[in-house]
Image (cartoon, rainbow, N blue to C red):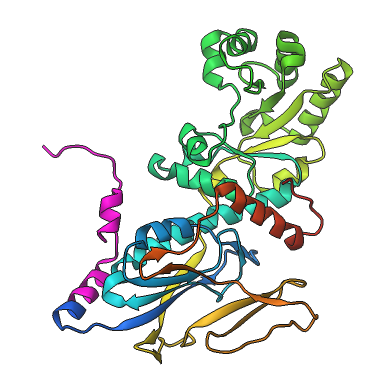
Amino acid sequence: MKKQSFHIASEREIKRGRTTDVYFSRTVEILKRSKSSRRVKAEFTAKSLPPEYGWAILAGLEECLTLLEGLDIDLRAVDEGTVIRPDEPVMTIEGNYIDFGVFETPLLGFLCQASGVATKAARLRIAAGEHMLISFGARRMHPAVSPMIERNAFVGGCDGVATVKAGEMLGIEPSGTIPHSLVILSGGIDDALAGFDKYMAKGIKRIALVDTFGDEKFEALAACDTLGRGLYGVRLDTPRSRRGDMYDIVRELRWELDLRGYSHVKILVSGGLDEAEIEDLCEVVDGFGVGTCLSNAHVIDFAMDIVEVDGEPRAKRGKMSGEKKLLRCAVCHSDFVIPAGSSGRTECECGGKVENLSRNYIKAGRIMRKLPAPGDIRRRVLKNLRWLDGRTECPD
C-alpha cells in the first residue's frame, strides 16, 4: 500500500525543478544534448490585471531569489511592495537558459499568487482606511501555503495575522479572539471569557466573540459585565442566515455599549467581508477580520518572456524584444518603459524627477543586497496607497 503523505512539493523538489511544466524540462534536455548553450534575457511582466484593477502590488520576489540563489545568473527587479501596472518589466533574468529554464513555472507561481494576495490586502486596506484589519485567510487555503497567504496579506496592508506560524515568520504576535468552540465547551460567553482571562497572558487583547448562543447585543453586554475595563473588544461573526442588516446591528450595539459606560470596547466584524461591505460598515465598526477574499484573491497574471538571445533582441509575436527598464515620476507617479540601453529621460512632463525602479538583486548567483523585512515592505505599500487613493490615510 502506498504511504500517505501531504499533497505538497518539498523545498528540495522545487529547487530540483520537479514542479515545472514538463515542456520546459524537455526543452532544457534538448539544448543540453545538442550542446546548444544560449545566453538569454527573460522578462517578467503582468499580462493583465483582474477586472476593475488598475494596479497591483508586487510580491513574491524573496522566494524567487531563494530559488535562484547560487545559479550562474544575474537578476534585476523592482522592490517588493512596488505598485505595478500591466506590461511593465518587474523582473529580468540574464543567463544561460539551461541554467534556469526549468524554474519558469515556480517563479511565476511565486509572483502570481503572492502579488494577488498583497494586492487584495492593499485594496481592503484602502476600503478600511484607519480601521483595524486582520487576516483570517489561512483556514481557506492549504496549510502548506498559509504562511505565504498571511505574509503577503500583512505586507499588503493588514495589521495582523491569525496563525502561529505566520506570526513567528513575521516577528509579530498573532491576533485572535475566542473561538465558538471555547464558548460551546464552556457553556456560555461568561465562563469562556473568564477562563480566557485567567489563563492567557495579560498582554493578549481580550476580544469576545458574541454570536454563539444568543443575540449579539446581550452576549456583548454579558462580556462587558464579565471583564469590565479589561475587555478590549467584541467580534461579530454572525452567520448570514441570522444576520439581517449588519450595519443596524452594529449601530444598535454601539449605542447600548456607550449608554452603559463601555465606550472603550471596540467592535470588530468578520464573516465573508469584501471591499464593499467594509466601506459600508466603516462608520460604525472599529475593525475587520477578512479571510476568504484574501485566500481566494485573484492572482496577478504574470508571464516570463525571452526578449534577447546571445545579445540579439528577439521575442515572440505580441511581445516587444530587447531588455527594458521601468521609470517612474516621483511627483505624478507616471510610468515609462524604455529600452534598457537608452539614456532615457530624467524628467516627466510634469517636471518631476524620473527614477529607474529596477535594482540589481543577484549577480553571478550571489544576492547583492539585504532583503527588507516584511514590516518595511508593508510601510512601502502604505506609503504608495496614499497616492493611489487620496481619500484615505492608511495607518503606518
Please count the marks in the image. Answer: 0
Residue 137 in the image: state x and y as whole percent: 53, 41
* Vertical side of 59 occupied by 7: above or below: above
* Camera-side residue of 10 and 2: 10
Left or right of 345 in this view: 144: left
Occupied quadrant, residue 366: bottom left
Occupied quadrant, residue 42: bottom left
Residue 174: tell me if it is visible.
Answer: yes
Does the stretch in magenta take in 25?
yes
* Camera-side residue of 390 and 189: 390
Which residue corresponds to the image point at 61% horizontal and 25% vertical from the top-left?
177
Which residue corresponds to the image point at 55% horizontal and 67% vertical from the top-left?
78
- Furthest residue in direction left, as rendered: 1
* Vertical side of 45 occupied by 215: above or below: above
Q: Which residues are magenta?
A: 1-29
Does the stretch in magenta take in 278?
no
Residue 219 in the image: state x and y as whole percent: 70, 16
* Vertical side of 177 occupied by 351: above or below: below
Residue 146 in the image: state x and y as whole percent: 45, 42
* Camera-side residue of 249 and 9: 9
Left or right of 266 in this view: 100: left
Which residue corresponds to the image point at 75% horizontal and 9% vertical from the top-left?
225
Occupied quadrant, residue 142: top left
* Vertical side of 110 occupied by 193: above or below: above
